[in-house]
Image (cartoon, rainbow, N blue to C red):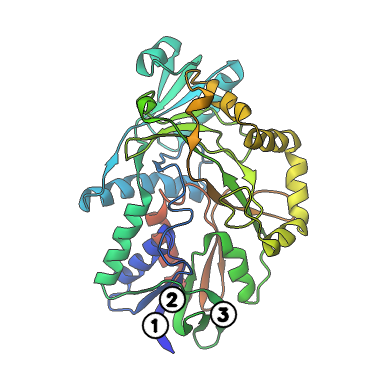
């Protein structure tokens, strides 16, 4: 039975950043990370747009807004210190019609309150800045950037090991018990710790249940489908291009993103997956599916957004519908340009009444702290999230 001061469940970027922060805050503490996969950071950390977000969309005063603003700075500084390639590309939010232009004003006000630098482009300025993008106006956010978050995560893992931490892969957590500390049963045996932190992403609600508590939400997996444009069109745009999002919907819409490897991707959409790791639309997990179908929050969520749900499903199955969303702001993307690219799965926390949890949620017990909900942009925000977690751990221990 291996014994540690701190055990962290989850080897994604949030779990790794938390373990590293625990090492810094508690010098000499024994820290272990338990990751069920054979490699680290292969779920939400790897499968995302690679955007270093600025915090444009998030409600002033929310943890989301605070973490993203701090994380934008922290991520870039970490990359500079460790020679991780990144680019401060900025990004454009494009209004394609009058309704978008009105919604853009609300985003500008949020940016003002959140102290995010922006610049407004008219139609002509937009055309000069990105000749292949069309719209009536746009907002330019210069502090956004792009990076490969898996590289950031791997560097954190390297630091953890160098500081004496231990990382266990192929280590599935099967049970949790709190005594004078915490006992973690896994596929590799039993670990004991003084304190447990869980950053389990898609499985956060199940970790809460293992501790004998009833979560106030359920994780519903939403698959985000991406495509990659052919190499000869990778310079079609030189900045991330986002639509103006509908504030009544929980997702940002399909966007064009130059990646750090020089490729250009488009996506994601948002459709319900039939497995928590449903990266393919054909992947079905009967246990996950039964759990989702028995949850009242799923049906109430669909009833809140019946038309968008149908449109997303149609566009997932009918590629011209997907393309139409892109062509609203970039008409030069053609159907034949949409080449296969790995999808991602977003862990969306949903309450029984169908309300989506849009901010961070933490569940505490005497010996544990569970990250219940870490919504996008958790990758950008990993380091300030880790500091926040460690501060709460300190309060609980004391």
Which of the two labelled residues, at mark 3 and mark 2, occupies the earlier sequence position?
2
Quadrant into which the N terminus falls = bottom left
Could you tell me which quadrant the C terminus lies in?
bottom left
Q: Residues within 10 Å of mark 1 (few under 14, many from 20)?
A: some
Mark 2 touching mark 1, by CB under 8 A? yes
Q: Tag 2's secondary structure?
A: strand
Q: How far apart are marks 2 and 1 (CA)?
A: 7 Å
- Mark 2 Cα within 10 Å, few/some/many (few <14, many 20+)? many
Tag on residue 7? Answer: 2
Circle 3 Cα neighbour tier, 10 Å, few/some/many (<14 / 14–19 / ≥20): many
Residue carrying label 1: 4
Q: Name the side, left or right, on which 270 lies relative to 84.
A: right
Question: Disc number at residue 324?
Answer: none
Q: Where's residue 279, x and y in %?
A: 56, 51
Q: Would residue 216 be visible to someone looking at this image?
A: no
Q: Please give the residue where the numbered disc 3 appears in the rendered image.
A: 176
Question: Residue 346, image x and y in percent?
Answer: 56, 50
Count of marks placed on residues: 3
- Distance in Å between CA atoms under marks 3 and 1: 15 Å
The image quadrant that residue 112 belongs to is top left
Q: 280 or 297: nearer the eye? A: 280
Question: With 214 as the anchor, is 119 left or right in this view?
Answer: left
The residue located at (49%, 51%) in the rendering is: 63
- N-terminal of the pair, mark 3 or mark 1, is 1
Q: Calculate the distance from the C-alpha at mark 3 to the C-alpha at mark 2.
A: 12 Å
| Along the line of sight, the residue nearer the viewer: 183 or 331 | 331
Relative to 100, say whether 155 is above or below. below
């Amino acid at each position: 039975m291996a014994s540690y001061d701190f055990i962290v469940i989850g080897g994604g970027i949030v779990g790794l950043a938390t373990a590293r922060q625990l090492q810094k805050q508690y010098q000499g503490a024994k820290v272990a990370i338990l990751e069920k996969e054979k490699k680290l950071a292969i779920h939400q950390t790897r499968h995302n747009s690679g955007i270093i977000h600025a915090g444009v969309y998030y409600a002033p005063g929310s943890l989301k807004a605070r973490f993203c603003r701090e994380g934008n700075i922290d991520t870039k500084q970490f990359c500079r210190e460790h020679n991780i390639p990144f680019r401060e590309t900025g990004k454009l939010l494009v209004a394609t019609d009058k309704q978008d232009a009105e919604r853009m004003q609300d985003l500008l006000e949020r940016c003002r309150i959140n102290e995010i630098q922006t610049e407004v482009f008219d139609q002509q300025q937009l055309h000069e800045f990105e000749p292949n993008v069309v719209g009536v106006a746009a907002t330019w956010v210069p502090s956004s950037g792009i990076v490969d978050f898996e590289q950031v995560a791997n560097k954190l893992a390297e630091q953890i090991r160098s500081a004496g931490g231990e990382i266990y892969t192929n280590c599935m957590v099967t049970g949790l018990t709190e005594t004078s500390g915490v006992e973690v049963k896994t596929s590799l045996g039993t670990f004991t710790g003084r304190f447990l932190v869980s950053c389990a992403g898609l499985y956060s609600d199940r970790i809460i249940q293992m501790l004998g508590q009833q979560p106030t939400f359920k994780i519903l997996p939403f698959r985000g489908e991406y495509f990659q444009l052919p190499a000869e069109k990778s310079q079609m745009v030189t900045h991330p291009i986002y639509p103006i999002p509908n504030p009544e919907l929980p997702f940002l819409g399909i966007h064009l993103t130059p990646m750090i490897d020089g490729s250009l991707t488009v996506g994601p959409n948002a459709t319900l997956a039939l497995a928590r790791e449903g990266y393919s639309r054909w992947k079905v997990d009967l246990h996950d599916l039964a759990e989702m179908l028995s949850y009242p929050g799923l049906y109430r969520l669909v009833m809140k957004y019946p038309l968008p749900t149908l449109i997303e499903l149609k566009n997932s199955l009918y590629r011209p519908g997907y393309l139409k969303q892109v062509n609203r702001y970039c008409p030069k993307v053609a159907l034949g340009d949409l080449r296969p690219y790995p999808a991602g799965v977003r862990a969306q926390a949903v309450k029984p009444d169908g309300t989506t949890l849009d901010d961070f949620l933490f569940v505490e017990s005497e010996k544990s702290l569970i990250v219940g909900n870490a919504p996008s942009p958790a990758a950008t925000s990993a380091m300030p999230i880790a500091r926040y977690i460690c501060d709460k751990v300190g309060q609980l221990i004391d």
